[in-house]
Image: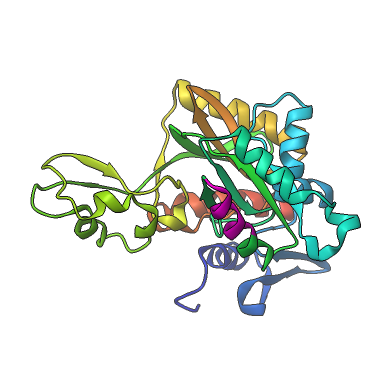
């Protein structure tokens, strides 16, 4: 087994080895063929095939997901779709830039611009001016056929619920990276211990100021695990129950069977941020490998006819 192989691939290898399933890993692990007798199943990316094609497309399209959730009355963060003008005016429309600027005017606290499809917080850009908006749009349109714009909101907490059918397999928070001052080092010096954090997103005026001893500073507005956030398991209680119910409502509206659902608390209320039908648990697996294996085992058991 390659040492740099994704936890997702390792988990599938383990399941197949224990259940007499022949596995063929192709395309550097992004396509996995699983054969048992005359039964053949596939895993592609982080999708193991439990969701219908329509549910998969709706979940992974941020704009479509927010529209469907809104129609179902599920609280969510709105994501406004804009198609790449390179597709032609008849597709993108003639006034897409004006519409973007209107959104900025309507949301003076800022906007978040990101690809319409994608995970792990890649190319997710916060903007507060038309110049920043133009740069962000140009960057994303250079690599994507569509982008979405959401209002920037102050997220108090972000929690991920991974569901199989309507069962919460795990519920965990995303704790943003932070440092605690020692009264000697500047914020820049303290932040060097966290290479995933982008220093250019911090307030330039504070970077070279010594952080008082014992004072905690959050280093990013992002809750993405790939940006240094840490998964923290949520114990049974009011928060877990509320998030599980909202996640089940969201999954039901979209029609997904196996999915990870990101929820955010804004002004004390929980809302759906995104739904991913490909369940990625790389960061979680480094801390809780047995838990992640159990979740993938349960999902793969459904793929192969309900076995565990």
Residue 247, given in percent of the width and then of the height, sits at 62, 32
Give the magenta part as a residue range: 129-137
Whether residue 130 is in magenta: the answer is: yes
Residue 169 x %, y %: 55, 40
Q: Where is 192 relative to 165, above or below?
A: below
> For residue 196, which quarter of the picture?
bottom left
Q: Quick check: 67 left or right of 263?
A: right
Which of the 4 image quadrants contains residue 108? Answer: top right
Q: Nearer the viewer, residue 143 or 9?
A: 143
Locate residue 308, reporting x and y percent: 63, 49
Colour scheme of the rendered structure: rainbow
Using the image as rendered, state which of residue 183 and residue 229 is in the foreground.
183
For the stretch drawn in magenta, the main secondary structure is helix
Residue depicted at 77% across the width and 46% down the height:
58
Q: Is residue 151 above or below residue 306?
A: above
Seen in the picture, residue 90 relative to 102 is either above or below; the reply is: below
Image-based side of 57 in relation to 128, left or right: right
């Amino acid at each position: 087994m390659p040492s740099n192989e994704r936890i997702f691939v390792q988990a599938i290898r383990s399941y197949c080895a224990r259940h007499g399933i022949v596995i063929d890993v192709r395309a550097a692990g992004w396509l996995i063929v699983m054969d048992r007798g005359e039964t053949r199943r596939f895993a592609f990316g982080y999708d193991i095939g439990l969701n219908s094609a329509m549910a998969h497309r709706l979940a992974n399209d941020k704009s479509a997901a927010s529209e469907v959730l809104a129609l179902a009355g599920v609280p969510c963060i709105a994501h406004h779709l804009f198609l790449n003008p390179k597709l032609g005016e008849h597709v993108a429309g003639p006034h897409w830039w004006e519409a973007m600027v209107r959104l900025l005017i309507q949301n003076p606290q800022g906007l978040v611009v990101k690809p319409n499809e994608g995970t792990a917080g890649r190319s997710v850009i916060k903007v507060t001016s038309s110049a920043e908006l133009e740069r962000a749009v140009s960057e994303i349109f250079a690599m994507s056929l569509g982008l979405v714009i959401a209002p920037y909101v102050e997220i108090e907490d972000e929690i991920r619920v991974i569901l199989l059918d309507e069962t919460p397999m795990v519920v965990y928070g995303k704790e943003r990276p932070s440092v605690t001052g020692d009264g000697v080092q500047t914020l820049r010096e303290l932040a060097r211990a966290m290479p995933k954090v982008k220093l250019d997103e911090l307030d330039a005026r504070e970077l070279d100021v010594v952080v008082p001893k014992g004072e905690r500073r959050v280093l990013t507005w992002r809750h993405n695990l790939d940006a240094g956030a840490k998964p923290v398991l949520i114990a049974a209680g009011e928060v877990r129950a509320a998030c599980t119910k909202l996640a089940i409502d969201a999954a039901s509206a979209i029609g997904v069977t196996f999915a990870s659902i990101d929820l955010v608390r804004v002004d004390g209320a929980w809302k759906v941020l995104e739904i991913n039908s490909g369940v990625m648990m790389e960061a979680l697996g480094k801390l809780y490998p047995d838990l992640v294996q159990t979740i993938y085992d349960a999902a793969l058991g459904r793929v192969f006819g309900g076995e565990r």
